[in-house]
Image: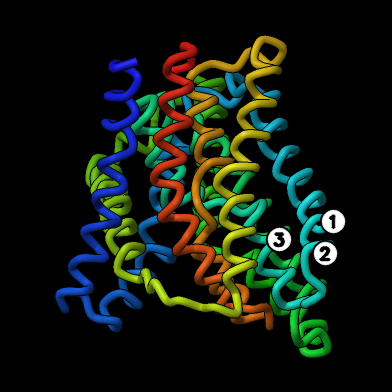
Amino acid sequence: MTDAFLFAAEAVLPIVLLIVLGYVLKRRGMLTKPFLDVGNKLTFRVLLPVMLFCNVYKIDRLSDVNVAFVLYGIGAVIILFLAAIAVCCAFTKDNAKRGSLIQSVFRSNYAIIGIPLAASLFGDKGAAAAGVMSAFCVPTFNILGVITLVIFNGNEEKQKADIKKIFLGVVKNPLIIGTVTGLAVLGIREIFVKTGISFRLSDVTVLFKTLENIKSICTPLALIVLGGKFEFSAVSRLRREIIFGTLVRTVAVPVIGLGTALLLKNTMSLSGEHFATYMGVFATPVAVASAIMAKEMGADDELAGQLVVWTSLVSTVTIFIYVTVLRIIGIF
């Protein structure tokens, strides 16, 4: 039990402390709003795409990818999305709130917290498995997010007129570009292997080392900026929705997603690195991008923003519990 507790602490606390550091520095005036806005933009447009590219490129061989592992992750996200529509529509009649709540169910903060968590839990193998999942998970989250907010928003007429523009934005999403580029370069590398060409991207030492350096900046800066953007406001009119969304995201979704994966563990040949990745998919808080998209597409962005804050706060405890349990039963 002590071993499991220490393992969970070593994996989770470094992530939590960086978020806390960002919040404290913001409160002390060292991180200003303009700095946080620029930091958020830099992370989203440059650092995260490079990190995703590097993680995907480090996959040994595409043929070694556990297809069942990927299919379960994506299939579970889609099922959660469909279930969320039914549950959230029953919970509230407000379309704008429905859009924000539905996103909170299926859309995790996979890129900023999930991938670093997988690496922390299972080292290079965890990072590699998370990189594989990101190639499919990131586009799925974005596409389902668009579908959600096109259907459920407070300004339906305007959003229908902007659907083409919105989908173009999904295609141009830096996170999708990073993962797809990584897959393309990985595919070229496999062709080189089959044809006997010895050249690799890593042979261009200056470029490859630069990419690795950018990748190393990503996680700490992204987590500090995330903490700096927290605003704990008491929104009485949204208390019921915040409690509902937070409990579903941090308790119901992880228990269902991880629990079902445990039941199918032997059937799908799942190992520790796969569960480390599933922690990122199912157990991490709501994605920051969900609040940004909610504002742009007419959903309740105030609710979306509060769900990001409160699920992030509560998940620091729930993730610790899930990691401890998985360690006790021998997954990690």
**Which is more N-terminal, label 3 or label 2?**
2
Q: Position of residue 150 (x, y in %)?
A: 78, 74
SS of the residue under disc 2: helix
Q: Position of residue 183 (x, y in %)?
A: 56, 41
Q: Of the residues shown, which amino acid type is indicated by label 3?
A: Ile
| Mark pair 3, 1: CA separation | 9 Å
Find disc 2 in the rendering and name its residue: 89
Q: Which numbered tag is attached to residue 102?
A: 3
SS of the residue under disc 1: helix
Q: Is residue 28 left or right of residue 315?
A: left
Could you tell me which quadrant the C terminus lies in? top left
Q: Of the residues shown, which amino acid type is indicated by label 2?
A: Cys
The reply to whether callout 1 and callout 2 are in contact (CB within 8 Å) is yes
**Dot 1 alpha-carbon crowd within 10 angstroms: few under 14, some 14 to 19, many 20 or more:** few
Q: Is residue 61 left or right of residue 85?
A: left
Q: Is residue 250 above or below residue 36?
A: above
**Dot 2 alpha-carbon crowd within 10 angstroms: few under 14, some 14 to 19, many 20 or more:** some
Find disc 1 in the rendering and name its residue: 86
